[in-house]
Image: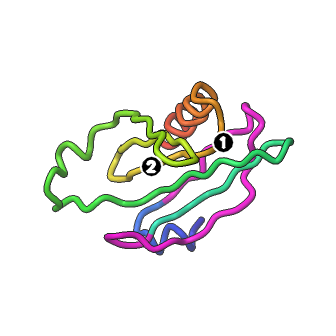
């Protein structure tokens, strides 16, 4: 976590999704349009995986005021649906081949842990 936090230039936390049966299996650093990003992968006992993608937001970018607001949005384009939101200078996306209601429950857990 310290290594990833240093790369994103902000302290990171990993949400606890164990109440829904998902445990952390790993994390990695990814490139992003405006800098480094972090990705965490979680897995349940059946081997179903979800990923949480985290990136810092540029406070000086156009629309930065709106970007500080938190709102869940659902995206279902492509084979893997996701919920994404913005909070406290980070952008988040939780994605997995799961039913929408379970994906929302996991996104809500992640949001509560990360806020």
Q: Earlier in the sequence, mark 2 or mark 1?
A: 1
Question: In the rendered image, which residue does mark 2 sit on?
Answer: 92
> Within the image, what quadrant is residue 55 found in?
bottom left
| Residue at x-position 79% and y-position 43% | 44
Quadrant where the N terminus is found in the figure: bottom right
Q: x and y percent of residue 59 in the render?
A: 21, 58
Residue 4 numbered mark, or none: none
Q: Give the residue at the far right of this rendering.
A: 45
Q: x and y percent of residue 3 in the render?
A: 57, 73
Q: Is residue 17 magenta?
A: yes
Q: Secondary structure at mark 2?
A: strand
| Residue at x-position 25% and y-position 62% | 58
22 left or right, relative to 34: right
State the residue in front, 107 or 101: 101
Would you place residue 11 above or below residue 102 in this image?
A: below
Would you place residue 30 above or below residue 102 in this image?
A: below
How would you rate the neighbour count of disc 1 (Cα within 10 Å): few for under 14, some for 14-19, many for 20 or more?
some
Question: In the rendered image, which residue does mark 1 sit on?
Answer: 16
Would you place residue 88 above or below residue 74 in this image?
A: below
């Amino acid at each position: 976590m310290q290594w990833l936090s240093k790369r994103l230039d902000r302290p990171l936390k990993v949400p606890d999704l164990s109440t829904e049966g998902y445990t952390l299996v790993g994390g990695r650093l990814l490139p992003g349009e405006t800098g480094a990003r972090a990705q965490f992968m979680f897995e349940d006992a059946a081997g179903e995986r979800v990923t949480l993608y985290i990136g810092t937001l540029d406070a000086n970018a156009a629309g930065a005021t709106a970007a500080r607001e938190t709102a869940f949005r659902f995206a279902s384009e492509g084979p893997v649906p996701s919920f994404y939101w913005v909070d406290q200078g980070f952008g988040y996306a939780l994605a997995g081949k799961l039913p929408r209601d379970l994906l929302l429950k996991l996104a809500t857990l992640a949001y509560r842990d990360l806020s």
